[in-house]
């Protein structure tokens, strides 16, 4: 049985959406956000502290776009994947990674500096710059989506799940009002999919039955700094993590 560790509407929504599209059986473990702070024992399962974590037999994966690719190749064949000998294969891989590396990354800086940091460490200028950067990157999709319904291969694929989550996050950041027309239509189309709606319902149901807060991760309030933490150091991250050079004190969405 596949197990997915997930926080409400965080990047782990990508694999959840894929699992629903593929209609695979899975167990969904809900965690409060950020688990590294609010569910410390999770670090024993995933030392990174991040979600998603997908466990499938002896396979353990922590990258949302890679998990999407894995699910449709390992548990396929499925039209959600694009085979190496198909015309759209290069586009497929490119958009699969574009969704995370190019479209989600700048938004994590908006989240951090506009929402997750305590007031004294917020940086509205940084948040604004990265919101603009995200929207500029997103604009490259406009001509493509003005002439086709999905990103590649003439059908809905895992690449649309990857980019679709970046659009979902943008909506949490209230950036969707600045989507260009074809991108806005595409986002509306993605949300109508049965698999997308099923994933929304699955996370709501699981949060309720597991007693986990159903506030979406992008809207989660930063945890209060521990007593004794200097204001300048007070991030949504415990002090010991701030001093761990491998983590560099970062709490990302
Ligand atoms: N590149 C990874 C990023 C994983 C990641 O940073 N996830 C965020 C949630 S969207 C997280 O767990 N943040 C909590 C933290 O950094 O403590 C992916 O695509 O899955």
Image (cartoon, helix red, strand yellow):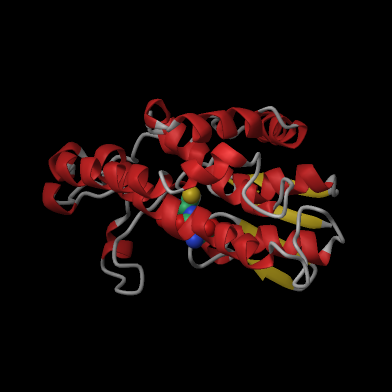
Q: Position of residue 226 (x, y in %)?
A: 27, 47
Image-based side of 159 in relation to 26, left or right: left
Q: In which quarter of the image is residue 53?
A: bottom right
Q: How many numbered circles are shown?
A: 0
Say which quadrant the N terminus sits in.
Answer: bottom right
Question: Is residue 36 at all visible to an observer of this figure?
Answer: no
Q: Up-down: is 187 above or below 139?
A: above
Q: Up-down: is 213 above or below 102?
A: above
- Give whichever of 173, 221 is nearer the camera: 173
The structure residue drawn at horizontal position 78% and vertical position 59%, both measured from the top left corner, is 72
Image-based side of 34 in relation to 236, left or right: right
The structure residue drawn at horizontal position 58% and vertical position 64%, both measured from the top left corner, is 62
- Give whichever of 8, 151 is nearer the camera: 151
Q: Position of residue 186 (x, y in %)?
A: 58, 34
Q: Up-down: is 1 above or below 29?
A: below
Q: In which quarter of the image is residue 127?
A: top left
Question: Is residue 240 at all visible to an observer of this figure?
Answer: yes
Q: In which quarter of the image is residue 92?
A: bottom right
The structure residue drawn at horizontal position 74% and vertical position 47%, both measured from the top left corner, is 155
Q: Where is residue 193 in the image (x, y as percent from the top left)?
A: 72, 32
The structure residue drawn at horizontal position 51% and vertical position 62%, both measured from the top left corner, is 43
Image-based side of 78 in relation to 32, left or right: right
Image-based side of 225 in relation to 148, left or right: left
Q: Position of residue 151 (x, y in %)?
A: 62, 49
């Amino acid at each position: 049985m596949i197990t997915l560790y997930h926080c409400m509407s965080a990047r782990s929504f990508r694999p959840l959406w894929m699992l629903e599209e593929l209609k695979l059986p899975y167990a969904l473990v809900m965690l409060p956000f950020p688990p590294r702070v609010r569910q410390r024992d999770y670090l024993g399962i995933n030392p990174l502290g991040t979600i998603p974590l997908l466990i499938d037999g002896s396979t353990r994966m922590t990258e949302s776009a890679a998990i999407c690719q894995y699910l449709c190749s390992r548990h396929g064949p499925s039209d959600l994947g694009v085979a190496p000998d198909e015309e759209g294969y290069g586009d497929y891989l490119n958009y699969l990674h574009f969704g995370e590396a190019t479209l989600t990354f700048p938004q994590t800086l908006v989240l951090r500096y506009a929402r997750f940091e305590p007031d004294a460490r917020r940086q509205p200028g940084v948040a604004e710059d990265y919101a603009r950067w995200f929207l500029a990157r997103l604009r490259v999709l406009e001509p493509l989506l003005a002439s086709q319904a999905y990103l590649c291969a003439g059908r809905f694929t895992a690449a649309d799940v990857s980019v679709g989550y970046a659009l979902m996050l943008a909506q949490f950041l209230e950036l969707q009002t600045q989507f260009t027309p074809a991108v806005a239509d595409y986002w509306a189309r993605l949300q109508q999919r049965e698999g997308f709606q099923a994933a929304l319902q699955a996370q709501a149901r699981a949060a309720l039955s597991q007693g986990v807060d159903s506030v979406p991760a992008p809207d989660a309030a930063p945890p209060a700094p521990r007593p004794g933490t200097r204001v300048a150091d007070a991030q949504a991250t415990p002090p010991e993590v701030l001093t761990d050079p491998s983590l560099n004190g970062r709490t990302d969405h």
